[in-house]
């Protein structure tokens, strides 16, 4: 790693992390390098005072991220050596909360941060003695009328998370009440709303204290303590807690202020708004800020696209400047209380609390670059605004409809059906996975519950969200996506519906025979609907199915491509409709009509063509995560890759496309596209565009409901987290190999 000053130009060139750092395994290697160095050079447990204890908050995060048992044991030995206590006095009459390093300063927050790790260790292996002292101290403290326990910024990290962690263990609401009372005291004393930052304590409040140039002096590490403490609190705070919104407002205001105050090299200077007050690199504040920003993005409280560049630059600083070759974390400002202390902070200047902050940031980074975590969070972000409203019958009332500037004048209520049908078709396999207690499992359960209520609203004529089934021709298209969602998750999305709702769906699907489909991919919409009716043993029209199959077969033009009608058009409708719906119809027919022996052969041929087409799609992905923008309907975004996603989910990927290569390539495109601001509006709905908000790109038939076909890329979420698609090491895509001078497969026509 570099331990010399890098030019601004060089930093900007290096602002993209190395390939290894873009994977959980790569980040884990960094965590282990840092933590192994620290523990090997500090084999003896220290006391339970704040700086030692701050390291252990990072060590526990490193243990949870890597599973390295020796990390847990290191903290367990430290806790045992300190008798699971902070300051050890048992004479409550002498307990103090002013600054002090004696055993009498039991109520001083610097002696309470150790309780965070004790509680974490308790949660890993419950034993009441591990948290007995923590409860004794905190419950005594809460019994007093005093509110000014957190009179310095650091105290918010030291103790706020103790309160929420103990609430989680005890369910004692007093912890949350006192948390807010103590936080309110600290906020009134130190928070500067105009800047979004906290002064270190009352001595440093402007204008009583100023930088040498007369500016407000916000100490980086002091604000790092606050920002990281808020992240930890929000992680454990119940969703409906009455003061949660206040904590979130302060957290978001700090995040935005930090984004603006970051230095070009990726770090934050010791005086946040006056670099000249204490120039040079500093790691502890930067690491705490990086942790908080990454946690905010990972939790969904901060927009990934808005803060992506900030965390990438910060991570680059931490790993390329602060981290030394031997594993030492350098440029850590020593113990102090203000920005301009310690003139000489260099690559070998390290400290336990700085290492702890680095480990916190790296552990959140590991989550940030986890492909499945990213996919599921993006899928949830896309789905929740739609299903949360529709389950209440309020989608039509609250969705911000956006129409193409060239809109053809059809009833704009088609938007809601397009939005719901296309979204559900993409996430149906994900919602079909069994429930579990992971955060992702909770997301799935919530979305499935909302989806079932939404399905009922969609066909209830008395509901405000009754869809536009009986007007226009467009409903044929999106009824097919709804039918496809039932085909993809029948046990989870169709069977739980009540009998009236099922009957209504069958009636609505059947009445769509009023629509004469155009001589194009629309034939497959009719075929998909009739195939679903066949699958539930409802009256169906086999002629509509077989005529569509025959025409699609006639329109095959070679090398994996079908024409969309009698003439070939160079666009992505093979991805959006033709390949996936054709294969799905044939799969269901083979299962339902086993007497028709030709279906197996037809399905095998169609699957091979889709494999060839998928190989072409993968080769279109550039080393930078882009792909060619051609043809109509480019606002459908990642719907382009539905065949690759479908083959991954159905375990049909060709040998030439290893799962780790496909996952990595799709993730790279996903991150590239959704790192651009403007994909979502302020209410969380997709906006017209390709990468961002580009309404001029949309065709005459496009509304922002149409765009939810991009959810088709999420089909592999239907594979469990331990499936090889998710666990295989990332592999370079074909273009990455080609442009880096590495061996790659030659291409041949099918």
Image (cartoon, helix red, strand yellow):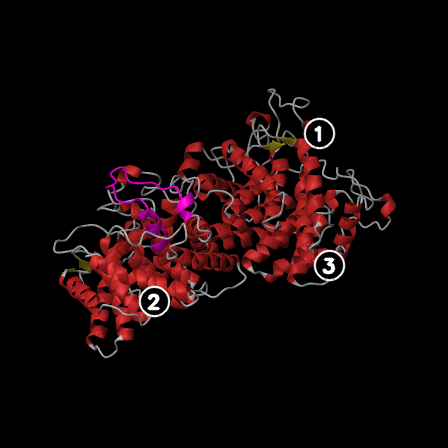
Residue 383 position within the rendered picture, expressed as x and y whole percent measured from the top left? 42, 52
Depth check, front residue: 102 or 739: 102
Q: Residue at x 52, y 48 (%)?
A: 299
Marks 3 and 2, how far apart at CA: 47 Å
Residue under pointer 2:
651
The first of marks 1 and 3 along the sequence is 3
Q: Residues within 10 Å of mark 1 (few under 14, many from 20)?
A: some
Going by the image, does 378 lie left or right of 609?
A: right
- Magenta stretch? 395-421
Identify the mark at residue 498; answer none if there is no mark: none
Going by the image, does 575 lie left or right of 115?
A: left
Magenta-drawn stretch contains 414: yes
Q: Secondary structure at mark 3?
A: helix
Residue 307 position within the rendered picture, expressed as x and y whole percent measured from the top left? 47, 40
Residue 346 position within the rendered picture, expressed as x and y whole percent measured from the top left? 58, 37
- Mark nearer the viewer, 3 or 2: 2
The first of marks 3 and 2 along the sequence is 3
Q: Is residue 334 above or below residue 135?
A: above
Q: Residues within 10 Å of mark 3 (few under 14, many from 20)?
A: many
Q: Secondary structure at mark 2?
A: loop
Identify the mark at residue 202; answer none if there is no mark: 1
Residue under pointer 3:
130
Magenta-drawn stretch contains 139: no
Marks 2 and 1, how far apart at CA: 62 Å
């Amino acid at each position: 790693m570099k331990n010399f000053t890098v030019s601004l130009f060089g930093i900007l060139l290096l602002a993209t992390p190395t390939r290894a750092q873009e994977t959980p395994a790569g980040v884990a290697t960094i965590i282990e390098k840092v933590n192994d160095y620290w523990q090997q050079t500090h084999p003896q447990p220290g006391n339970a005072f704040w700086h030692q204890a701050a390291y252990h908050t990072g060590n526990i995060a490193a243990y949870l991220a890597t599973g390295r048992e020796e990390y847990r044991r290191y903290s367990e030995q430290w806790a045992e050596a300190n008798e699971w206590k902070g300051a050890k006095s048992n004479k409550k009459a002498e307990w103090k909360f002013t600054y002090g390093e004696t055993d009498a300063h039991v109520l001083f927050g610097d002696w309470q941060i150790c309780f965070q790790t004790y509680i974490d260790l308790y949660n890993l292996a419950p034993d009441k003695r591990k948290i007995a002292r923590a409860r004794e101290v905190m419950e005594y403290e809460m019994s007093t009328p005093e509110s000014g326990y957190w009179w310095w910024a650091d105290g918010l990290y030291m103790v706020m998370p103790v309160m929420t962690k103990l609430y989680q263990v005890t369910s004692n609401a007093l912890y949350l009440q006192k948390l807010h009372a103590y936080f309110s005291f600290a906020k009134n004393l130190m928070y500067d709303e105009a800047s979004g930052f906290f002064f270190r304590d009352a001595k440093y409040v402007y204008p009583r204290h100023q930088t040498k140039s007369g500016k407000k002096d916000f100490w980086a590490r002091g604000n790092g303590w606050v920002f990281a403490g808020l992240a930890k609190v929000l992680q454990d705070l119940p969703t409906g807690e009455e003061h949660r919104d206040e904590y979130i407002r302060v957290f978001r205001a700090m995040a935005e202020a930090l984004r603006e105050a970051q230095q070009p090299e990726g770090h934050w200077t010791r005086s946040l708004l006056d670099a000249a007050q204490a120039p040079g690199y500093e790691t502890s504040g930067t690491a705490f800020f990086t942790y908080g920003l990454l946690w905010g993005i990972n939790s969904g409280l901060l927009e990934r696209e808005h803060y992506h560049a900030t965390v990438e630059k910060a991570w680059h600083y931490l790993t390329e400047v602060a981290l030394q070759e031997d594993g030492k974390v350098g440029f850590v400002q020593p113990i102090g209380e203000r920005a301009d202390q310690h003139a000489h902070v260099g690559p070998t200047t390290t400290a336990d609390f700085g290492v702890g902050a680095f480990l916190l940031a790296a552990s959140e980074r590991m989550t940030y670059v986890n492909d499945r975590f990213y996919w599921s969070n993006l899928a949830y972000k896309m789905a929740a605004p739609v299903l949360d409203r529709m389950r209440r019958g309020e989608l039509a009332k609250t969705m911000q409809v956006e129409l193409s500037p060239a809109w053809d004048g059809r009833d704009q209520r088609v938007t809601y059906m397009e939005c719901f049908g296309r979204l559900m078709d993409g996430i149906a396999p994900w919602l079909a996975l069994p429930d579990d207690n992971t955060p992702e499992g909770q997301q799935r359960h919530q979305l499935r519950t909302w989806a079932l209520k939404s399905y009922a609203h969609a066909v209830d004529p008395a509901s405000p969200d009754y869809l536009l089934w009986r007007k226009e021709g467009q409903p044929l298209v999106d009824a097919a996506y709804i039918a496809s969602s039932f085909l993809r998750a029948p046990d989870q999305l169709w069977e739980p519906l009540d009998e009236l709702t099922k009957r209504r769906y069958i009636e609505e699907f059947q009445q769509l025979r009023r629509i004469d489909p155009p001589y194009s991919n629309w034939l497959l919409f009719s075929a998909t609907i009739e195939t679903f009716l066949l699958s539930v043993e409802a009256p169906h029209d086999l002629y509509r199915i077989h005529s569509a199959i025959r025409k699609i077969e006639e329109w095959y033009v070679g090398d994996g491509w079908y024409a969309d009608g009698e003439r070939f058009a160079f666009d992505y409708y093979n991805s959006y409709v033709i390949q996936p719906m054709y294969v799905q119809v044939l799969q269901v027919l083979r299962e339902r009509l086993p007497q028709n022996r030709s279906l197996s052969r037809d399905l095998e041929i169609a699957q091979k063509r889709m494999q060839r087409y998928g190989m072409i799609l993968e080769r279109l992905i550039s080393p930078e995560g882009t792909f060619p923008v051609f043809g109509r309907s480019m606002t459908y975004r990642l719907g382009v890759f539905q065949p690759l996603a479908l083959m991954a989910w159905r375990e049909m990927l060709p040998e030439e496309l290893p799962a780790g290569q496909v996952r990595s390539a799709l993730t790279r495109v996903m991150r590239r596209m959704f790192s651009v601001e403007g994909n979502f509006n302020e209410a969380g709905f997709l906006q017209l565009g390709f990468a961002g908000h580009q309404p001029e790109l949309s065709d005459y038939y496009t509304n922002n409901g149409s765009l939810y076909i991009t959810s088709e890329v999420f089909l592999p979420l239907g594979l469990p987290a331990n499936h090889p698609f998710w666990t295989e090491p990332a592999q370079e895509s074909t273009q990455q190999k080609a442009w880096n001078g590495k061996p790659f497969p030659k291409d041949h026509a099918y």
